[in-house]
Image (cartoon, rainbow, N blue to C red):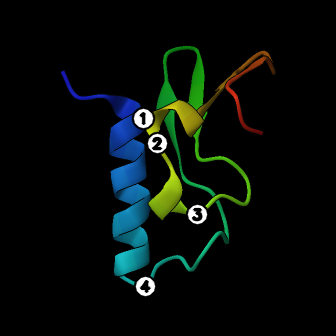
Amino acid sequence: MADPRSDLIATALAMGANGLNRGTAGNVSVRHGDGFLVTPTGMDYEESVPEDIVFVGLDGRVDGRRK
């Protein structure tokens, strides 16, 4: 099974390579369980690792080492 955090980083990198996003402008997210995974604010996708991806629950809880 694919790691959704790694897939999210790969998608963010592909968006940049295709000119859909530049630098740290915007975030990329995907629904996951009872919330979603999102790229951290202000962090270059090229420097991101799966542990940087943040989970945000639909109830507002946040789980991750970044914001």
| Residue at the spot 56% in from the left edge and 80% down from the top edge | 22
Q: Is residue 37 left or right of residue 17?
A: right
Tell me the CA gap for discs 3 and 2.
10 Å
Q: Percent position (x, y) of residue 26?
A: 66, 65
Q: At label 2, which amino acid type do we have? A: Val
Give how far apart the Cα atoms at labels 1 and 2 are: 8 Å
Q: Residue at x 78, y 15 (%)?
A: 59
Q: Residues within 10 Å of mark 1 (few under 14, many from 20)?
A: many
**64 to 15, vertically: above or below:** above
Give the foreground label among 3 and 4: 3
Residue, disc 1: 5
Q: Quadrant of the C terminus?
A: top right
Q: Which residue is mark 2?
A: 49
The one of 53 and 26 positioned closer to us in this rendering:
53
- Could you tell me how far apart the alpha carbons at marks 4 and 1 are, in whole angstroms? 21 Å
- Residue at image mark 3: 44
In the displayed structure, does residue 10 sit left or right of residue 26? Answer: left
For mark 1, give the secondary structure: helix
